[in-house]
Structure formats: C-alpha cells, structure tokens
Image (cartoon, helix red, strand yellow):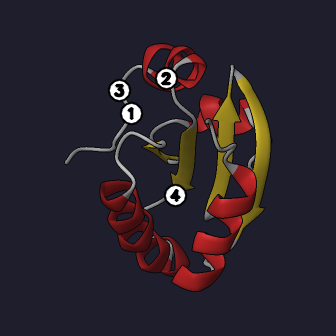
Amino acid sequence: MAYDVTDFQKEVIDASFETPVLIDFWAAWCFPCRMLGPTLEKLAAENEGTWKLAKVNTDQNQQTAAQFGIRGIPAVKLMIDGKVVNEFVGALPEPAIRQWLAEAIPVTA
C-alpha cells in the first residue's frame, strides 16, 4: 500500500474531513524515521478505515514541512477536520504508538 503523499491538500487536508489522517514527516537519511515508518505502516494496515497514513518526505517537501513547523524528525501529526489535533516527535515503540492512537483518535459510535 502506498502512503507517500503527492497532493497534500487533497490527500491530507481534504481527506481529514472524512477520516483522521496521521502524517508522518520523515527523511531517508533519518535512522529513527526508518525505524518508525514500518511500525506506522503496519498499524495503518491493521486499522484501515479508522484512520489514514500519509508519509511526507521532508527533503522533497520542505515547504510543507516548514508550514507545519517541523524542526525534528520523525514528526507525527494527527489531522482531523483540517486541523492538527495531536502530535509527537521521535520514534516511539509500537505499544506507545498504539496507546497514543487510542487516546488521540475519537471513537465514533
């Protein structure tokens, strides 16, 4: 499954009005990013429909990274209804990410 973003407005901002979007700001040279990425992809595949993963390479999308105030990577932001509602920086272990997701993503009844 491809998670790389080609149209940020459509695939992230607009999509966040339908489904929460988890944005992974990363770079190929970033070792912690390479550790975090597969974990986020695994969780996205498990939770398909609950939230969507969008990966943004900060080297290729410097303007977008600057727009979101990215100062360190990996940086993960959760966008709902066009707004960032939660975030973390750094490579967290899978159990910590699962807990963060459980607390950050609203449950719809």
Mark 3 lies on residue: 6
Does the residue at mark 1 contact the one at mark 3 (Cβ under 8 Å)? Answer: yes
Q: Amino acid at mark 2?
A: Phe
Please report whichever mark, 4 or 3, sits nearer to the chain's N-terminal start: 3
Find the distance from the CA under tag 4 to the CA under tag 3. Answer: 15 Å
Q: Nearer the viewer, residue 27 or 1?
A: 1
x and y percent of residue 82 in the render?
Answer: 69, 20
Mark 2 lies on residue: 8
Q: Residues within 10 Å of mark 3 (few under 14, many from 20)?
A: few
Q: Amino acid at mark 1?
A: Val
Which residue shows up at 38% across the image and 33% down it? 5
Find the distance from the CA under tag 4 to the CA under tag 1. Answer: 12 Å
Q: Is residue 71 visible?
A: no
Q: Amino acid at mark 4?
A: Trp
x and y percent of residue 80 in the render?
Answer: 68, 30
Q: Tell which residue pokes out farthest to the front in this image.
A: 109
x and y percent of residue 10 in the render?
Answer: 45, 14
Q: Is residue 106 visible?
A: yes
Mark 1 lies on residue: 5
Q: Nearer the viewer, residue 35 or 99?
A: 99
Q: Amino acid at mark 3?
A: Thr
Q: Residues within 10 Å of mark 2 (few under 14, many from 20)?
A: some
Q: In this rendering, is residue 31 above or below 87?
A: below
Find the distance from the CA under tag 1 to the CA under tag 3. Answer: 4 Å
Please report whichever mark, 4 or 1, sits nearer to the chain's N-terminal start: 1
Mark 4 lies on residue: 26
Q: In this rendering, is residue 63 above or below 30?
A: above
